[in-house]
Image: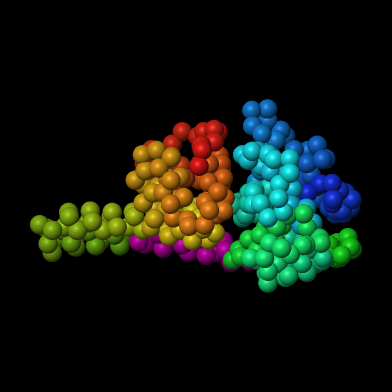
Amino acid sequence: MARPRIFISSTYYDLKHLRSSLENFVDSLGYESILSEKGNIAYTPEIPLDESCYREVQNADLFILIIGGRYGSETSKHQKKPNRGFFERYESITKSEYASAILRDIPTYILIESNVHSEYQTFLKNKDNEDIVYAHVDSVNVFYLIEHILSQPRNNPIHTFERFSDIEFWLKEQWAGLFKELLHRLSSQQQIATLSSEVTTLNEINKTLKTYLEAIVFKVSPENAAGLIKTEAQRLKEAIQVNELRKNPFIRHLRDEFNISFNTIFKAIYESKKYDDIVQKMIDEVDDDDQKKHLYSLINRIDAQKDINAAREILEVKPFLLRRRRLTP
């Protein structure tokens, strides 16, 4: 029987005992825990190791992010430095794993050490003060990661903890609520089936009405009928396309996280002749340099390219060839 796959993301050395306890807890519930040190991530030789982790995140059913005092190693797209300054900004593997989960809208649970969360409140009051010394984190990026998570409009439940029992209790409560919601949905299946049948009937009625109306238009105004019918058919087609595009995961992510308007995204996807053009048009819509780098990292991933190609197919324009190489921003 298929089991829920739960990806556990965090820095390793400072949280390895907590990761081990969480692995045992998840496995005891009959679920499948996914951790990099467990050896159940399929690494592919032609791509960097961290890219394999991001891909595995997208195959998970639930995502747990633990935030402690360490920010973690740089992603493969960054030039690694042995000693980074406390206030130096960069993207970590842990943050990128979280971004992959959010991109696929995987149910996500955020756990933050109490000391780190308390110190985050101090950071908020001293953002511009680089003379302050923080006791519980090794990089200011930890605070910016928390700030980024809190800025999400949804799917960002946060719980602070001091010991593992705090985590265990909270996750049991959260997953019990998720299970109850699933039972509620199952009990509503009959109503959904009935509604689906009614929708099918309405679709058939609409087809019949369309035929009747076209016949009436041809009879009342034969000289304008063909043009009117063609115009309305095109309008209906465009409305359906727009509705489908709004469901696209990456388009939703561009709107929610980077505040790029739907019309701008629509035009970029439809009019661009090269994938580079879309990348540049999206980057140009973002003012903050860190956000530009984050967007650049996301939009060049294979999954983002697939979503954009899916959107182009809806718009009936030729999709782009997928590529694995990175461009220079």
Instruction: Give the image location of residue 168, x and y in percent.
Output: 86, 61
The residue at 68%/39% (across/down) is 80
Task: Residue at the far front: name it.
Answer: 131
Instruction: Tell me where residue 238 sits by quadrant.
Output: bottom left
The residue at 78%/38% (across/down) is 40
The residue at 62%/54% (across/down) is 102
- Tell me the quarter of the image containing the N terminus: top right
Specify whether 292 is left or right of 235.
Answer: right
Specify whether 288 is left or right of 285.
Answer: right
Residue 251 vertical placement versus 170 (above, below): above
Please tell me which residue lies in front, 85 or 75: 85
Specify whether 93 is left or right of 291.
Answer: right
Instruction: Give the image location of residue 27, x and y in percent.
Output: 85, 49
Please tell me which residue lies in front, 159 or 84: 84
Whether 197 is among the magenta residues is yes
The residue at 43%/36% (across/down) is 320
Whether 160 is among the magenta residues is no
Residue 322 vertical placement versus 293 (above, below): above
Please tell me which residue lies in front, 328 or 46: 328
Instruction: Give the image location of residue 278, x and y in percent.
Output: 42, 45
Task: Residue at the far left: name it.
Answer: 223
Instruction: Give the image location of residue 279, x and y in percent.
Output: 45, 45
Number of marks drawn: 0
Q: Which residues are magenta?
A: 188-207
Secondary structure, magenta segment, majority class: helix
Is there any visible trace of residue 236 in the rendered image?
yes
Instruction: Tell me where residue 116 sits by quadrant.
Output: bottom right
Is there any visible trace of residue 184 in the rendered image?
no
Specify whether 329 is left or right of 90.
Answer: left
